[in-house]
Image (cartoon, rainbow, N blue to C red):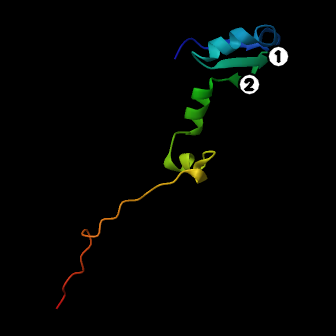
């Protein structure tokens, strides 16, 4: 993580592109009247903070997944009834 950047509201409004660049390295704190009020994060940092990740359940909600045909192989010799006599 890089050096933390702090901007007051006016500086943030005047230098939004610089704030976005700084947020790629570390969170950017935005202050009003000297008090932190907002934090600008990269999307990767936000997703990590929220615990996002690519899980199978996420993939099931993908657009167009209903149209994918999946052929499952059969294995007839795998399960054999047990002789309990």
Residue 5 visible in rendering: no
Q: Is residue 16 above or below residue 53?
A: above
Residue beneath the point at 51% across and 54% down: 69
Q: CA distance from mark 2 to mark 1?
A: 12 Å
The front one of 34 and 57 is 57
Tag of residue 33:
1
Which marked residue is nearer to the observer: mark 2 or mark 1?
2
The front one of 36 and 66 is 66
Q: Position of residue 70 (x, y in %)?
A: 47, 55
The number of discs equals 2
Residue beneath the point at 57% across and 27% down: 44
Whether pointer 2 and pointer 1 mark residues with C-beta atoms closer than 8 Å, the reply is no
Tag of residue 38:
2
Q: Is residue 38 above or below residue 77?
A: above
Q: Position of residue 51 (x, y in %)?
A: 55, 39
Residue beneath the point at 50% across and 45% down: 55
Q: Is residue 46 left or right of residue 13?
A: left
Say few, some or many: other residues with alpha carbon within 10 Å of mark 1 (under 14 / 14 to 19 / 20 or more).
few
């Amino acid at each position: 993580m890089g050096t933390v950047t702090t901007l007051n509201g006016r500086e943030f409004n005047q230098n939004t592109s610089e704030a976005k660049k700084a947020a790629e390295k570390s969170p950017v704190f935005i202050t009003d009247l000297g008090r932190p009020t907002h934090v600008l994060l990269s999307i990767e940092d936000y997703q990590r903070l929220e615990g996002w990740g690519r899980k199978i359940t996420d993939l099931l909600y993908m657009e167009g997944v209903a149209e994918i045909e999946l052929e499952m192989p059969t294995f007839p010799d795998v399960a054999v009834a047990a002789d309990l006599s």
